[in-house]
Image (spheres, rainbow, N blue to C red):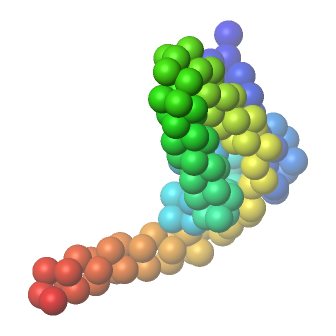
Amino acid sequence: MNINMHQHKCPHCHQATVSNLAVRWSSREIPAKCRDCGQLSHVIASTSSGIWVLGVVLLVAAGIVAVIAQSPWAGLLGLSGVVAHNVWAWRRVELWPIDRNSAKTAAQVGWLATVAGWLAVLFH
């Protein structure tokens, strides 16, 4: 029995061999790896951010409706809608190919930007 039932298609070999969990955590810095061809791919940042932001907006809206309706059932219904949207959206994301050098460079730039940001905050 396969725990990761849903698999995403690799943009390189076009086989459904990229796990759902790897796709959810993928970025330019930490790409998902195809189990068939070993190539790397990622979800673009605007897509993953959009899924997260819409989930938060829907959750806040569900909370407001639950308070106005004075019903925890309305909140639970809204929460189930948020979970359903999250699952649906992540199953529909498109993977973009990335080569190993680009992923390595993106990771280095990400760390550099993080360190520079912290230094700017600390020594401002």
Image coords of residue 7 (percent x, y): 74, 33
Q: Nearer the viewer, residue 38 or 61?
A: 61
User: Does any portion of residue 42 appear in the rendered image?
Assistant: no
Determine whether, in the image, residue 9 is placed left or right of residue 35: right
- Using the image as rendered, state which of residue 86 and residue 56 is in the foreground: 56
On the image, the x and y values in percent for residue 23 come to: 63, 45
Picture layout, residue 52 above or below residue 112: above
Q: Where is residue 27 in the image (x, y as percent from the top left)?
A: 57, 59
Name the image quarter holding the C terminus: bottom left
- Tell me which corner region of the image, top left, top right, bottom left or bottom right, holds residue 112: bottom left
Residue at the far right: name it. Answer: 14
Relative to 110, 62 lies left or right: right
Rendering quarter of residue 9: top right
Residue occupying image coordinates x 52% and y 42%? 60
Q: Which residue is drawn at 73% across and 42% down?
A: 89
**Whole-percent x and y of residue 75?**
54, 24
Report the residue at 74% width, 28% height from top: 6
Q: Tell me: residue 68, above or below residue 46.
A: above
